[in-house]
Protein backbone atom coordinates (compact mmCIF):
# COMPACT_ATOMS: atom_id res chain seq x y z
CA UNK A 1 0.00 0.00 0.00
CA UNK A 2 1.34 3.35 -0.96
CA UNK A 3 2.59 5.71 1.73
CA UNK A 4 1.86 8.62 -0.64
CA UNK A 5 -1.89 8.08 -0.73
CA UNK A 6 -3.51 6.95 2.50
CA UNK A 7 -6.00 4.12 2.06
CA UNK A 8 -9.31 5.03 3.71
CA UNK A 9 -10.16 2.18 6.07
CA UNK A 10 -13.13 1.15 8.22
CA UNK A 11 -12.29 -1.08 11.15
CA UNK A 12 -15.11 -3.19 12.62
CA UNK A 13 -14.70 -5.40 15.69
CA UNK A 14 -16.61 -5.61 18.95
CA UNK A 15 -13.35 -5.94 20.91
CA UNK A 16 -11.66 -2.57 21.50
CA UNK A 17 -8.22 -4.16 21.96
CA UNK A 18 -8.46 -5.85 18.54
CA UNK A 19 -9.45 -2.54 16.94
CA UNK A 20 -6.44 -0.88 18.60
CA UNK A 21 -4.09 -3.63 17.42
CA UNK A 22 -5.44 -3.47 13.85
CA UNK A 23 -5.39 0.33 13.86
CA UNK A 24 -1.71 0.27 14.84
CA UNK A 25 -0.91 -2.36 12.22
CA UNK A 26 -2.79 -0.57 9.44
CA UNK A 27 -1.22 2.78 10.23
CA UNK A 28 2.18 1.26 9.40
CA UNK A 29 0.79 0.25 6.00
CA UNK A 30 -0.35 3.65 4.76
CA UNK A 31 -3.94 3.29 5.89
CA UNK A 32 -6.02 6.01 7.47
CA UNK A 33 -8.69 4.72 9.83
CA UNK A 34 -11.65 6.91 8.84
CA UNK A 35 -14.08 5.15 11.19
CA UNK A 36 -14.43 2.34 13.69
CA UNK A 37 -17.47 0.31 14.70
CA UNK A 38 -18.19 -2.24 17.40
CA UNK A 39 -21.10 -4.01 15.72
CA UNK A 40 -22.65 -4.55 12.30
CA UNK A 41 -25.29 -1.87 12.64
CA UNK A 42 -22.66 0.77 13.41
CA UNK A 43 -20.54 -0.60 10.57
CA UNK A 44 -23.31 -0.01 8.03
CA UNK A 45 -23.81 3.56 9.23
CA UNK A 46 -20.08 4.23 9.07
CA UNK A 47 -19.67 2.54 5.68
CA UNK A 48 -22.43 4.65 4.16
CA UNK A 49 -21.01 7.84 5.67
CA UNK A 50 -17.32 7.24 4.96
CA UNK A 51 -17.27 5.03 1.83
CA UNK A 52 -13.95 3.41 2.84
CA UNK A 53 -11.67 1.80 0.31
CA UNK A 54 -10.89 -1.07 2.70
CA UNK A 55 -13.06 -2.59 5.43
CA UNK A 56 -11.79 -5.04 8.01
CA UNK A 57 -14.87 -6.78 9.41
CA UNK A 58 -15.14 -9.14 12.36
CA UNK A 59 -17.43 -12.14 11.86
CA UNK A 60 -18.68 -12.68 15.41
CA UNK A 61 -20.27 -9.48 16.76
CA UNK A 62 -23.39 -8.44 18.67
CA UNK A 63 -26.56 -6.93 17.11
CA UNK A 64 -25.62 -7.83 13.54
CA UNK A 65 -22.86 -10.34 12.83
CA UNK A 66 -20.20 -9.89 10.20
CA UNK A 67 -21.85 -12.22 7.69
CA UNK A 68 -25.10 -10.22 7.70
CA UNK A 69 -23.09 -6.99 7.62
CA UNK A 70 -21.05 -8.20 4.66
CA UNK A 71 -24.25 -9.15 2.83
CA UNK A 72 -25.77 -5.73 3.50
CA UNK A 73 -22.65 -3.82 2.46
CA UNK A 74 -22.17 -5.82 -0.73
CA UNK A 75 -25.87 -5.51 -1.64
CA UNK A 76 -25.62 -1.73 -1.48
CA UNK A 77 -21.99 -1.38 -2.60
CA UNK A 78 -21.13 -4.37 -4.85
CA UNK A 79 -17.52 -3.24 -5.33
CA UNK A 80 -16.81 -2.90 -1.60
CA UNK A 81 -13.45 -4.35 -0.59
CA UNK A 82 -13.91 -6.30 2.65
CA UNK A 83 -11.51 -8.55 4.53
CA UNK A 84 -13.08 -10.63 7.27
CA UNK A 85 -11.46 -10.93 10.70
CA UNK A 86 -12.12 -14.08 12.67
CA UNK A 87 -11.09 -16.09 15.65
CA UNK A 88 -13.21 -18.95 14.28
CA UNK A 89 -11.75 -21.93 12.50
CA UNK A 90 -14.94 -22.92 10.68
CA UNK A 91 -14.06 -23.29 7.01
CA UNK A 92 -17.78 -23.35 6.18
CA UNK A 93 -18.13 -19.84 7.65
CA UNK A 94 -15.03 -18.61 5.84
CA UNK A 95 -16.24 -20.07 2.53
CA UNK A 96 -19.64 -18.44 3.03
CA UNK A 97 -17.98 -15.05 3.50
CA UNK A 98 -15.83 -15.54 0.41
CA UNK A 99 -18.92 -16.60 -1.56
CA UNK A 100 -20.64 -13.40 -0.41
CA UNK A 101 -17.81 -11.33 -1.85
CA UNK A 102 -15.24 -10.93 0.91
CA UNK A 103 -11.80 -10.42 -0.63
CA UNK A 104 -10.07 -12.50 2.02
CA UNK A 105 -10.17 -13.45 5.67
CA UNK A 106 -7.64 -13.16 8.46
CA UNK A 107 -7.48 -15.13 11.65
CA UNK A 108 -6.88 -12.81 14.59
CA UNK A 109 -4.02 -15.00 15.79
CA UNK A 110 -2.08 -14.63 12.53
CA UNK A 111 1.40 -13.17 13.05
CA UNK A 112 1.37 -9.42 12.37
CA UNK A 113 3.85 -9.50 9.48
CA UNK A 114 1.81 -12.20 7.77
CA UNK A 115 -1.37 -10.14 8.31
CA UNK A 116 0.28 -7.17 6.66
CA UNK A 117 1.36 -9.31 3.72
CA UNK A 118 -2.10 -10.82 3.24
CA UNK A 119 -3.84 -7.44 3.45
CA UNK A 120 -1.33 -5.94 1.00
CA UNK A 121 -1.65 -8.83 -1.48
CA UNK A 122 -5.45 -8.80 -1.29
CA UNK A 123 -5.54 -5.05 -1.91
CA UNK A 124 -3.14 -5.29 -4.87
CA UNK A 125 -5.20 -8.16 -6.35
CA UNK A 126 -8.33 -6.05 -5.96
CA UNK A 127 -6.70 -3.09 -7.72
CA UNK A 128 -5.45 -5.32 -10.55
CA UNK A 129 -8.95 -6.78 -11.05
CA UNK A 130 -10.50 -3.31 -11.12
CA UNK A 131 -7.88 -2.11 -13.59
CA UNK A 132 -8.46 -5.13 -15.85
CA UNK A 133 -12.22 -4.48 -15.71
CA UNK A 134 -11.68 -0.81 -16.53
CA UNK A 135 -13.25 0.40 -13.29
CA UNK A 136 -10.11 1.95 -11.82
Image: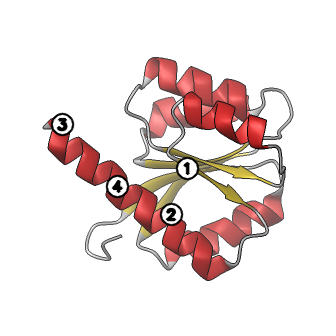
Comparing 18 with 95, the one in front is 95
**Pointer 4 and pointer 1: residues touching (CB < 8 Å)?**
no
Q: Which mark is residue 125?
A: 4
**Label 1 residue SS:** strand
Which of the two discs, 3 and 1, labels the residue nearer the N terminus?
1
Left or right side of 7 for 65? right
**Pointer 4 and pointer 2: residues touching (CB < 8 Å)?**
no
Separation of residues labelled 4 and 2 (CA atoms): 10 Å
**Label 2 residue SS:** helix
Which of the two discs, 3 and 2, labels the residue nearer the N terminus?
2
| Image coords of residue 43 (percent x, y) | 64, 36
The residue that mark 3 highlights is: 133
The residue drawn where x is 13% and y is 38% is 134
Which of the two discs, 4 and 1, labels the residue nearer the N terminus?
1
The residue that mark 1 highlights is: 104
**Label 3 residue SS:** helix
Comparing 42 with 114, the one in front is 114
**Label 4 residue SS:** helix
Which of the two discs, 3 and 4, labels the residue nearer the N terminus?
4
Q: Which mark is residue 119?
A: 2
Foreground tag (4 vs 2): 4
The residue drawn where x is 49% and y is 54% is 9
Which of the two discs, 4 and 2, labels the residue nearer the N terminus?
2
Q: Residues within 10 Å of mark 3 (few under 14, many from 20)?
A: few
**Res. 136 visible in picture:** no
Q: Residues within 10 Å of mark 4 (few under 14, many from 20)?
A: few
- Quadrant in which the N terminus appears: bottom left
User: Image quadrant of residue 29?
Assistant: bottom left
Separation of residues labelled 3 and 2 (CA atoms): 21 Å
- Depicted 104 relative to depicted 135: above or below: below
Amino acid sequence: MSQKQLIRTLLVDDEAHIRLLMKTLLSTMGCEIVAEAGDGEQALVQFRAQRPQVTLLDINMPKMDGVATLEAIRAEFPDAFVIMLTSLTSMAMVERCLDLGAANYLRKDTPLEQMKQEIRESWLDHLAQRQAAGTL
